[in-house]
Amino acid sequence: YTELKDSGESGFEVVFVSSDQNDEAFKTYYEDMPWVAIPYDKREGIKDLLDTKFEVEGIPTLAIVDADANTVTSDARSLI
């Protein structure tokens, strides 16, 4: 991720959506991640919508979405 971003690659982004139980746990878990995240206090409603859209059944889940927000796959973990 970091190598691609540092090279100027701008065709993708990783967005972390927390399933942590509180803001402190989110901050501790997220502090070493290089990608963006939906702030813990702003995820209300967004997380439920994304869980439904990408058929999240467990964590971690990795989905790939195209530039038009169409789901490419909800099971990207199996690709890496």
Image: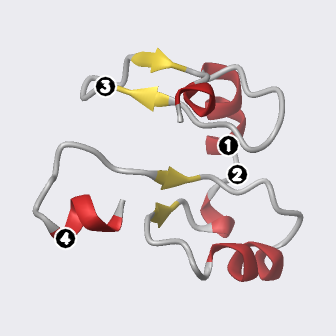
Residue occupied by mark 3: 66
Q: Are marks 2 and 4 in contact (CB under 8 Å)?
A: no
Judge left or right: residue 79 versus residue 56: left
Say what amino acid the circle numbered 1 marks: Lys
User: Label 2: which residue?
Assistant: 44
Q: Please give the name of the residue rendered at 13% of the width and 65% of the height, measured from the top-left corner.
A: 7
Foreground pick, 76 / 63: 76
Q: How far apart are marks 2 and 4 (CA)?
A: 32 Å
Residue 2 at what x, y percent from top left? 33, 67
Q: Are marks 2 and 1 in contact (CB under 8 Å)?
A: yes
Which residue lies most toward the left here? Answer: 8
Residue at image coords 34%, 50%? 13
- From the viewer's perspective, tell me whether residue 9 is left or right of residue 68: left
Judged by depth in the image, the label closer to the viewer, 4 or 3, is 4
What amino acid type should be assigned to the residue bearing mark 4?
Asp
Which class describes the residues within 10 Å of circle 3: few (<14), some (14-19), or many (20+)? few
Residue occupied by mark 4 = 6
Picture residue at 59% right of the left edge, 37% below the top: 62
Q: Which of marks 3 and 2 is in front?
A: 3
Q: Mark 1 points at which residue?
A: 47
Residue 4: x and y, percent?
A: 23, 58
Secondary element at tag 4: helix
> Which badge, 4 or 1, comes first in the chain's sequence?
4
- Of 68 and 74, nearer the camera is 74
Which SS class for mark 1?
A: helix
Residue 3 in percent (x, y) is at: 27, 66
